[in-house]
Amino acid sequence: MSSENPSTLKSYVDSATGLAQRAVGTVTGNPSTKAEGEETKAQAAQEHEASHTTAKVGSVTADPNTGATATDNPKRNNGTWDQTVGSAKESLGNLTGYEGLRREGVEQNSRGKAAEAEGQLKDWGEGMKDRAQGGLGKVAAAAKGDRTEEQKWEAMHDQGKAQQRGAEADMERRA
């Protein structure tokens, strides 16, 4: 795999390159070209997987590939808390036969799910925006030859990626 940060786009390009190399090797009967294509394709799969990796500690998502971190929208954590408390109230209401407590728990759990989903969508959207803005800013700074400005935009891109991937990981876990 390359020494650069993993990139989803790069993984797609490498995968296509690997398929082309394999096809050329098959058509020409050259086993080394075919094997090189298989290796490029395998590296692309690893790169794609690495570009989607995040780690979560509390309310902070980190991208181990870039070191960028992003703090979760507070609605995500508050929503999770409301779901937990709501479920406990609902269970206690069921156990004791107290219908008011059970209904209150169901409502709080429902509000928690909605708040968590809203926070996830906000984080995902802000992450996408920061990734795009950071990527465009980096290109503009590189065109000007301003390495300091380029690093600032790259950091914004990486933070947006961590934020987006963290929200995606939470959404997948909940699905």
Image (cartoon, rainbow, N blue to C red):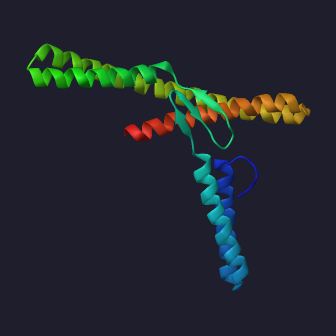
Residue 142 visible in rendering: yes
Nearest the camera: 89 or 107?
89
Which quarter of the figure is the C terminus placed in?
Answer: top left
**Residue 106 image position (x, y, % from top left):** 22, 22
Nearest the camera: 122 or 28?
122
Vertical placement of 79 versus 29: above or below? Answer: above
**Residue 141 image position (x, y, % from top left):** 84, 31
Vertical placement of 126 versus 47: above or below? Answer: above
* Residue name at image x 70 percent, y 29 percent: 156
- Residue lying farthest to the right in this orientation: 145
Horizontally, residue 127 falls left or right of residue 6, namely: left
Horizontally, residue 35 falls left or right of residue 146, namely: left
Horizontally, residue 135 falls left or right of residue 172, namely: right
Q: Quadrant of residue 92?
A: top left
- Residue lying farthest to the top in this orientation: 100
Q: Quadrant of residue 16?
A: bottom right
Which quarter of the figure is the N terminus placed in?
Answer: bottom right
* Residue name at image x 64 percent, y 65 percent: 41
Horizontally, residue 152 falls left or right of residue 105, namely: right
**Residue 72 image position (x, y, % from top left):** 53, 25
* Residue name at image x 73 percent, y 31 percent: 155
- Residue lying farthest to the left in this orientation: 97
Residue 106 visible in rendering: no
**Residue 160 image position (x, y, % from top left):** 63, 31
Numbered circles on residues, count: 0
* Residue name at image x 31 percent, y 25 percent: 84
